[in-house]
Amino acid sequence: MRHAAYLDGQSTLKPAIQIVHDDAASGSAAACCPSCQAPAVDKFCSRCGESIAVHAPSAGEFLHEFVGHYVALEGKLWQTLRLLMFRPGQLTVDHNRGRRVPYINPLRLYLTLSLVVFALIKSVGIDLPHVTLEDEAAGLAYLHKIDDPTRLNKTPYAKLYIQVEIEEERAAMRKLVALTGRFNADWAENGARFMDQPDSAKAQVLNNGFFTYLPYMLIGALPLFALYLKLMFRRSGRRYGEHLVFALNVTAFAFLLMSAMILIPGNLVWLFGAGYYGAFAQISIWDWVQLLPLIWMVAYLPAALRRVYGGKTWKVWIQSIVLMSVHVSVILSLVAAAEIIAIFKHG
């Protein structure tokens, strides 16, 4: 950039004395924003936020920026996680007060931890309960691999199985198929095809539907969770968005603990199932360790509610029980509805 200095009092436009120097050559050029051309005195434009340092990105920077749109990778992630874990509700309080720069955005934090937990489920290959159908009955079966095969009939797996009669449910399903035929013949045909399949094939369809739709149902249930809070604390004067931030943070914490439970040896389902049937000899110490994050998760919601919304301890615990009961019921209902839609659309 070239600069010129003029003497005062000159009537001509030509300078009496001209001092010319090239700032670009000396390395002290006054930078301008490449987007809005505003003068910049820092690394980022104060008007639009554009970076002033323009350079061709390296492969590492490009990959970091690409992944960063979906996963939080910044250093402030650890500060956010520390506050999320050990000060329930504080992230919501700070966000609603306008203190947001030091932390990860609530939605981005939720998406990051949800990706982590579902990636762990896929990679670690944990056993999950699955639906079985046979002899006019539906069952929830769970196979659990044990360390010592000699402890349980010399088999490496122990099986929990809970079965309920569903003869009436089958009849109701056939009525629903017939009713659907009045509105859409293709749906009725798909539903009838499903009903005529062997029980093992039906169970496979239901299990695939559950594991396929669960992540979407969890996301879909978030606005409903915020709605419950809006109704429960309607006298607080808070906007719906504030309740949504609370729902995002609490669910993100649940994902964080679920990830820890996946990585910790032991299995909570097996602990409750074997304990219910009195098979305490088959429960390992790691199965008992799984109780610690569960207790933390149960105590977390009341503590977060009290910090954000206030109230007496006993009242907050009642509110927490109501919220979790309704939320889990809605998620299961949404999954069931999604499976029914899948049955009628694909058979």
Image: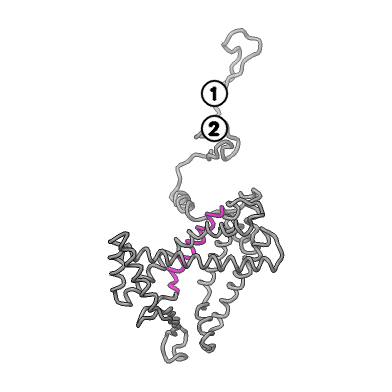
Q: CA–CA distance between discs 1 and 2?
A: 15 Å
| Stretch in magenta | 105-126
Q: Is residue 228 left or right of residue 212?
A: right
Q: Is residue 312 left or right of residue 263?
A: right
Q: Residue at x 43, y 82 (%)?
A: 163
Residue 254 at least partly seen = yes
Q: Between 159 and 6, which is closer to the camera in this rendering?
A: 159
Residue 78 at least partly seen = no
Q: Dot 1 corresponds to which residue?
A: 2
Q: Position of residue 3 (x, y in %)?
A: 57, 22
Image quarter (top left, top right, bottom left or bottom right) of the C terminus:
bottom left
Q: Residue at x 47, y 68 (%)?
A: 332
Look at the image and say whether residue 303 sits in the magenta stretch.
no
**What secondary structure is marked by label 2?**
loop
Q: Residues within 10 Å of mark 2 (few under 14, many from 20)?
A: some
Q: Dot 2 corresponds to which residue?
A: 32
Q: Between 48 and 190, which is closer to the camera in this rendering?
A: 190
Q: Residue at x 50, y 34 (%)?
A: 35
Look at the image and say whether residue 109 sits in the magenta stretch.
yes
Q: Position of residue 303 (x, y in %)?
A: 66, 65
Magenta span: predominant SS is helix
Label number found at residue 252: none
Going by the numbered disc 1, the residue's amino acid type is Arg
Q: Residue at x 64, y 48 (%)?
A: 98
**What secondary structure is marked by label 1?**
loop
Q: Is residue 185 left or right of residue 106?
A: left
Q: Quadrant of residue 43?
A: top right
